[in-house]
Amino acid sequence: MPTTVKSFPFGSNITKGLGTGRNPEIGEKAAKEDIERIKNLFAGDRDLYIFVSSLGGGTGTGATPVLVKIAEEMGLNSIGIFTLPFSFEGKKKMDIALKSLEKIKESLNACMVLPNEKIFSIAKGDISFNDSLNLLNNRLSESLEGLLRTIYMPGLINIDWADIKTIIEGKKKTAYLNFTKAKSTSSVDEITEELLKNPILEYPFENAENVMFNVESDKSLSLQMLSLISEKISELSPNARIIFGLMQNPKFKNDIGITIFATSKIIKEEVKKKEKPKKKVVEKEEKKEVEIRKNALEIKEEEEKKKEKEDEEESIYEIPTFLRKQKK
């Protein structure tokens, strides 16, 4: 398993070693200045590149889209892990971070997003700011270590690089990664509740399309426990392609450790514009009066009849009311 950490300074002619001043444009220019060096960095025989960056500032926000684009053009497999600012850092910083994230997603196989705001869901009591950040970092590092053990360490039922490649195949996928450790005597519900609900991630596990989970334990792990854990995973993602691994690790004596890694396609919710119901236009048919030509005699007869009718109606009201009633 790789343990070496090296630094890679870039853009020194632009930044003069003084940073970007939280300006993403400077971060982008700094990365573009050293494109050839970055290509050489990626030229090694490596199966997977993991990009980790805090978005909203200058260096990570501006440079990461450039780096992941280079990796894509070189045909490299890559996943990303990115944090978003706290809400109290302001809307502008969040907008800058989200704009960068949208660019980054285009080039990655899959990415995970960790909003800093999620710290409040795991920090308890009057915890200090540094300790709360450590909680987030520790949780993430445990999950990454579990993923790396899954890739590099042999198992009784082995998960190899080809399986990981199957999980991340494609572009612009969301990713879910978590690791949990519990006593072998713990209930399946307790273990899977912790495993399948990672409170620090933006994207949930539910309805994942590709799932890989690796179980680490000693030789005492029961077949029934494995079966029940697998069933719980299948319940939340019934249509997923599931890859299962088992590793006997002496460090997990009387304990069980599970690493789960899942991906899904990013689905953009398109807001459909509601079409206003079309008003039915009822065309009024104009009644066309048909003029009928009449002779003088016919006109005189009509006028006489009309006058007789009017005289009759008027005569009714000349009779007292009680007599009119009697007449009826």
Image: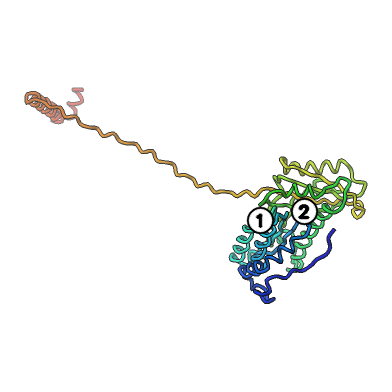
Where the C terminus falls, by quadrant? top left
Secondary structure category for the residue under label 1: loop
Q: Nearer the viewer, residue 28 or 245?
A: 28
Q: Which residue is mark 1?
A: 107
Q: Amino acid at mark 2?
A: Asn
Circle on res. 178: 2
Q: Residue at x 19, y 28 (%)?
A: 322
Q: Closer to the observer: label 2 or label 1?
A: 1
* Residue 127 percent location from the top left of the image: 75, 66
Q: How was this image coloured?
A: rainbow
Name the image quarter holding residue 318.
top left
Which element type, helix, strand or loop, lies under badge 2? strand
Marker count (numbered): 2
Location of residue 130 with respect to 49 vertically, above or below = below
Residue occupying the point 71% across, 66% down: 37
Location of the N terminus (image quadrant): bottom right
Residue 57 in sight from this viewpoint: no
